[in-house]
Amino acid sequence: MYTLLIRNVTAVDPGDDATRVLPEHDIAITGGRIAAIQPAGRVQSDEADEIIDGTGMAALPGLINAHAHTAMTLFRGSAEDVPIDEWFNDYVWSMETNLTPDDVAWGARLGIAEMIAGGVTTVADHYIEMDVIAEAAEAGGIRAHLAPTMFGADPRAELAAAEAFAGRWHRAAGGRIQAWLGPHAPYTCPPDFLREVAREANRLGLGCHIHVSESAAQVDASLAAHGVTPIGLLQRLGLTDGRLLCAHATHATPDDIALLAASGAGVAHCPKTFLKLASGIAPVTAMRAAGVPVGLGSDGAASNNTLDILEQLRLAAMLQKHELHDARALPLHSALAMATSAGAQALGQGHELGRLLPGYLADVILLRLDRTHVQPVHDVSAALVYAARAGDVDTTIVDGRVLMRRRRLLTLDETEIMREVGGRAERLRQRGHGRTMQTYST
């Protein structure tokens, strides 16, 4: 007996080397895992507790947001048309001092609702007040890899708080939530603190999620101060010895890429943020060729404006073609993998997440192919990469549980969330108080 049966759908399984497309198939789910993928009609209706008709839709693994600051939906559109140093120092790090835990909780709910509606089933989040974000993820039903942000101002207290968070939340919510350590970056955290983070991660058996090599200036500053690139510094301090997720790595050098590949580190690529802040485009094609798992991230809505991974997918593909002057760069199957299977690999879950295969976690989305902007469908992969929109996602399933059906969210109250967030907006955008979370050096 199956708990859920998706009938007569086009099943899309994005692998590293090719995308397998299976028209007119059924997907059977038992508990939180995919039990079978078979030609339509082989599974009888009375063999399933719940049935979803997938006619006219593509089923694919839930999209993976490999780097986000989910609660920064609160600052959407509040820091526009400014360079990266002003973005941090004059806007974001000033406004973030206004946040209360309750603010973060509602911002997280807004972001999780947006992601579920856009087919994102897993998020790797890096932010403050992580307990309330974990509560929002648990309530919303999403899968979440959560890293409380640390700057190293009070190393002992920050590491103790991170360990306590991991004790409360690692593998909570039926395994949907995993804890990581979240040192902010090598340009904001002292080297001795990063060395201690690496030791603590090893002791606790946790991964580290960190921003690195976001700008050319950061690389130059690291070379001047330490004699190595920021990624080289992470290796020197021991962070590449364990599980490592590098947000951005926009200015990774060939030696950096070889280092990342040898260590098994993952990279989260956030092309819309790079474009908006004019900080450069990561060498994704070179990373993938070296064997580095590269997933897609939205970053925060203050630098991206949406948490739409389909938009990131499209930008990633086109930017590699543009940067390399090669229309063959980052082809359809590679782009789809970055949003799914490669993102899972970057998070250390490639063995059970990001594919439509029996035994894998039942994180599945259904996306409509019968819309005017998608038809006619000559190539399903092309339709998904270059024509489909977040609003075409019809159904979102995590761990075999339906979180959205026919565009209706089932776990979160959108009206309540938007009312709460709207009532906080004016207070949150105040910047004249003279306080700041950190300082971005130029």
Image (cartoon, rainbow, N blue to C red):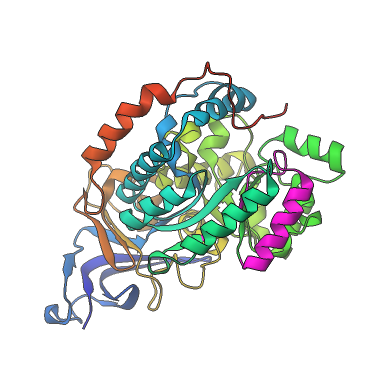
Is 202 placed above or below 408 here? below
Q: Nearer the viewer, residue 381 or 125?
A: 125
The quadrant of the image that shows the N terminus is: bottom left
Q: Residue at x 79, y 53 (%)?
A: 255
Q: Residue at x 46, y 33 (%)?
A: 99
Is 206 placed above or below 136 here? below
- Point out residue 87 in the picture as x, y percentages from the top left corner: 57, 25
Q: Is residue 322 left or right of residue 122?
A: right
The image quadrant that residue 39 belongs to is bottom left
> Does residue 73 appear anywhere in the picture?
yes
> Over which residues does the magenta segment extend?
179-205
The quadrant of the image that shows the C terminus is: top right
Q: Residue furthest left?
A: 46
Q: Is residue 136 left or right of residue 184?
A: left
Q: Is residue 332 left or right of residue 380?
A: right
> Does residue 374 appear anywhere in the picture?
no
Q: Is residue 182 magenta?
A: yes
Q: Nearer the viewer, residue 91 or 249?
A: 91
Q: Nearer the viewer, residue 282 or 146?
A: 146
Q: Is residue 3 magenta?
A: no
Q: Residue at x 18, y 62 (%)?
A: 55
The image quadrant that residue 280 belongs to is top right
The image quadrant that residue 260 belongs to is bottom right
Q: Residue at x 50, y 26 (%)?
A: 95
